[in-house]
Image (cartoon, coloured by chain):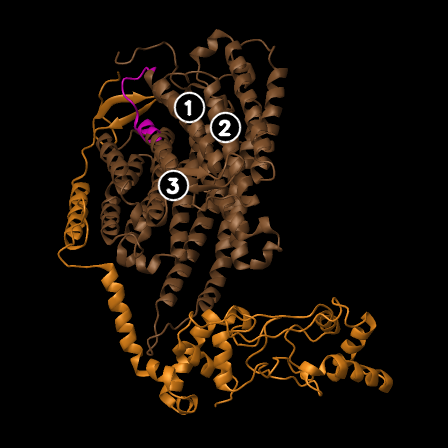
Chain colours: A orange, B brown
Amino acid sequence: MALKERDEFSGQMTTGHEWNGIKELNTPVPRLLWAFLATLSLFAIGWTVLMPSWPGVNDYFRGLLGADQHQAVRQSLAEADVAKASWSERLATEDFATLAGDDAIMTVVRQTGPALFGDNCAGCHGYDAGGNPGYPNIAEAPMMWGGDVETVAETIRVGINSNHPETRYGQMLAFGRDQMLASAEISALADYLVSLQGQKSLSAEETESAKTLFADNCAGCHGEDGTGMVETGAPNLTDAFWTYGADRSTIRHSIYDGRQGTMPSWEGRLSSTQIRLLALYVMDLRGATP
Amino acid sequence: MFSDFSRDERIFSFIILGGLVVAGLAMAIAGRGDLLSTHGWLIFGLSLLAFFAAVRQFDRPEPSAERLSEYYDAPTRAGLVLTLIWGVIGMGVGFWVAALLAWPDLTFDVAWLSFGRLRPVHTSGVIFGFGGNALIATSFHVLQRTTRARLPDAISPWFVLLGYNLFCIVAASGYLMGLTQSKEYAEPEWYADIWLVVVWVVYFAIYMRTLARRKEPHIYVANWYYMAFILVVAILHIVNNLAVPVSFGSAKSYSLFAGVQDAMTQWWYGHNAVAFFLTAGFLGMMYYYLPKRANRPIFSYRMSIISFWGITFMYMWAGSHHLHYTALPHWVQTLGMAFSVVLLVPSWASAGNALLTLNGAWHKVRDDAVLRFMALAAIFYGITTFEGSFMAIRAVNSLSHYTDWTIGHVHAGALGWVAMITFGSLYSLVPSMFKRERIYSNKLVEMHFWLALAGTVIYVFAMWNSGVIQGLMWRTYDEAGTLSYSFLESLDAMHPYYIIRAFGGLLFLLGAITALFNVVMTIRMPAMEATPDRGRDLPAEPALQAGE
């Protein structure tokens, strides 16, 4: 065992232990450290006296302040309800025309709408509601299931091709895969739809035969003039808005394999106040006040 | 390796490897049609290769009896290299997942490249691969030097080192295939967990058997910490991983715990993994390599004692601070917070003890990047433990929880403390372990130091900013009483910080690559004829009896 010795630099004695050249000083624990320990221990003990803390066999010490996190949540929620009371009940019950004409309500809609839309709708439709491939533009494009505010609120409530019993149901048939149309016919239709957007010009003969094909196969859902029908949820094919893409190969793919997009039902996930608020918010985005 | 084994040890190693071959084959057959068989074939293949490699060396001459009067350092040498390899892998994947958060398209629609599978490869790669190998390698070295006793036999340290790395490989490959228990830092499935228990028991036995034969009367502080690390990690690992496999032919298992009990067990484990794996083990490392490099005595033996017992006692109760404002009963949260706050005292006492040990050697800190790594580690340890106690306060946690602040906190500890103390210890250990006169390039060590420091600071500041912004955005209400920001807006706000974080991580990774290069080049330098007196260890002989 090594001998205790005085360290020249610090003036402290060593403990006399040595391990492969490592020694230890016997420096007393600094007073500051004891004070620090005492302070934090007092705080910690004091905290356990004030708050729910020490457990017994069947129960625990409730703490002098009577704090309880379940009650704190209930209280916070109740306070939040009070804060929203001035508008939430009205949004759930009054008719849309009254609500849209009320500046106070529309201020709330414009303030609350972006976060609500951002958390629930933007994932598919985009932040600005401008749509993404497979998810329609709902800021500008005609609404496939009807563009008045009541209908929009209903679409949000039941969803499209969702698991809600009253869901809106729509399907674009797979004309190619299910052998309802030949490949050449599908190409002709795709060319025709592209030509409607002015991206391609067809001969009069080609246009005529495509129109016949359209009348026989498409008009039932999309309408004689192809401008869409809200009853079937079939989109307008003559405008610039395309859910899946406006290029010829995407259109051809849509006709060949069909489409059946879904929108979840929000009833049960959002309150009717929130659903109606979102409908008003979307209408407001479209610049179409009901 | 094999030439260090006696004849009996060689036969015993055949039995172990043969057992592994059979076990791997059994897993492969029992787990037909399940991912378990992939791991079975992996274990079968690796152990068969090892078996044949061993057979070819069976007739080599036995080692001389003189070896028993020297320390056994071969496993430490291998462990140091493995540490750096895992470090580069783990940090490389870390950089990859950091980039994924900034640019999510980098998954390329490949399942195993998805964030959920790569992220545990990063965390396990750095914690268990890099940190674990560093702890095993240095603990064997420190244990022998501070007890003046050779490891009890040649085979068990290799069993621990290689067995542990087999666990790491099975764990990481499992994550990529989608195998996980979904418990953070305890993802590996039941068969990997059982294997780790076997390895860990042997590890603890090595410690006990060597300490029992020590020739120093006292047990050095570093060994207290290494022992606490080994013992407590065993307890945590066994309890948190209690599970029932679907069958012996299935990789899937179900935890014995459910609901809030599961959450509490998981965070009792999770927080004490931080405490006993990432803190206690590395404090052991610090208590040996820092005073050794600085050539100064430990500032205060008494402070070592109160910090050790403070840390080991109080950490055990602090885990529930991970579950503030959850279904966990309020009283458990209060106790977790109370213990976490007092925990700051022994943590700062440890950091203070390290920094005050440098009194009289600060000029060395200025001149020597290796010592500077260790000094900076102690500073980051102090910063991180303060932050940890602060974040454990319930009201603070309501802002910080679930945000990037937590990520920033963890990396202040992992990069600033764990990795820095490891790199400092590694650089000071490598030349003597490989009997080289010096490290290949001190300039590269210096460069590594600044890369590591810059990387850590950039990373941590980015995450602090991002975390506080997130926390505030998530709790801001407008006059109507509804949330002001959607979650997507908070993601947008984080995007620049995610890019900055990835850059900080890249700097740190470059530093680790520098270290690997530097160490490989050191190993390739010519060996010294004889160890100069300056770096020589006290001999394991003459044999002194304990208490003499």
Q: Position of residue A289 (x, y in %)?
A: 48, 90
Label 3 – label 1 distance at C-alpha? 26 Å
Instruction: Chain letter for mark 1, please.
Output: B
Count of numbered labels shown in the rendering: 3
Is residue B453 shown left or right of residue B520? Answer: left
In terms of depth relative to the viewer, which is nearer, B132 or B187? B187
Query: Image quadrant of residue A8?
Result: top left
Q: Which residue is mark 2?
A: B163
Q: Residues within 10 Å of mark 3 (few under 14, many from 20)?
A: few
Looking at the image, can residue A199 be seen? no
At mark 1, the secondary structure is: helix
Residue B202, label in figure: 1
Q: Which residue is mark 3?
A: B256
Quarter of the figure that contains the C terminus of chain B: top left
Query: Image quadrant of residue B365?
Result: top left
Instruction: Chain letter for mark 2, please.
Output: B
Query: Image quadrant of residue A17?
Result: top left
For marks 3 and 1 on the same chain, the one whose residue lies earlier in the sequence: 1
Q: Are marks 1 and 2 on the same chain?
A: yes
User: Which segment is the magenta one?
Assistant: B213-227
Q: Residue at x 19, y 42 (%)?
A: A33
Q: Identify which amino acid the numbered label 2 is placed on.
A: Gly
Query: Which circle, 2 or 3, is nearer the viewer?
Result: 3
At mark 3, the secondary structure is: loop
Q: Position of residue A154 (x, y in %)?
A: 49, 80
Is residue B293 shown left or right of residue B74? Answer: left
Residue B266, label in figure: none
* In magenta stretch: residue B420: no
For marks 1 and 2 on the same chain, the one whose residue lies earlier in the sequence: 2
In terms of depth relative to the viewer, which is nearer, A139 or B539? A139
**Contact, CB < 8 Å: mark 1 with mark 2?**
yes
